[in-house]
Amino acid sequence: MIATACLALGLVLITEGLAWALAPSLLERLLEALRTLPMDARRNLGLAALALGVALVWLAKQIGA
């Protein structure tokens, strides 16, 4: 269980680091766009990302990761 959590955290950090390293100006524009969204829309976006993440972790565990 700890190994899976470390793997997941590592993959998140790799993805985030690549995004900031390869396209920092694009991410700045994305953050500006997010600031203009109403709080409910941001919350719904977060919940959708959470659901997708849970589904991907479940799928990975089902296929043997």
Image (tube, rainbow, N blue to C red):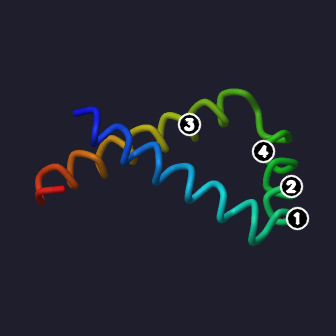
Is residue 21 or residue 40 the one in the foreground?
A: 21
Q: Earlier in the sequence, mark 3 or mark 4?
A: 4
The answer to whether mark 1 and mark 2 are in CB contact below 8 A is yes
Q: Nearer the viewer, mark 2 or mark 4?
A: 2
Q: Is residue 37 left or right of residue 9?
A: right
Question: Which quadrant is home to the N terminus?
Answer: top left
Q: Which mark is residue 25?
A: 1
Q: Which mark is residue 34?
A: 4
**Residue sitting at x 22%, y 55%:** 60
Q: Farthest residue in the bottom direction?
A: 22
Q: Is label 1 in a helix, a strand or a loop?
A: helix
Q: Which mark is residue 41?
A: none
Q: Nearer the viewer, mark 1 or mark 4?
A: 1
Check disc 2 and report the residue beneath it. 28
Is residue 56 or residue 14 the one in the foreground?
A: 14
The answer to whether mark 2 and mark 3 are in CB contact below 8 A is no
Residue 27, horizontal then vertical, whole percent:
79, 58
Q: Earlier in the sequence, mark 2 or mark 4?
A: 2
Is residue 32 or residue 44 the one in the foreground?
A: 32
Q: Earlier in the sequence, mark 3 or mark 1?
A: 1
Residue 39, horizontal then vertical, whole percent:
72, 27
Residue type at mark 3 is Gly
Residue 17, horizontal then vertical, whole percent:
66, 57
| For residue 16, above or below residue 37 | below
Q: Quadrant of residue 35?
A: top right
Q: Is residue 25 left or right of residue 1?
A: right
Give the CA distance from mark 1 to mark 4.
14 Å
Q: Is label 3 in a helix, a strand or a loop?
A: helix
Check disc 3 and report the residue beneath it. 46
Give the CA distance from mark 2 to mark 4.
10 Å
Give the CA distance from mark 2 to mark 3.
18 Å
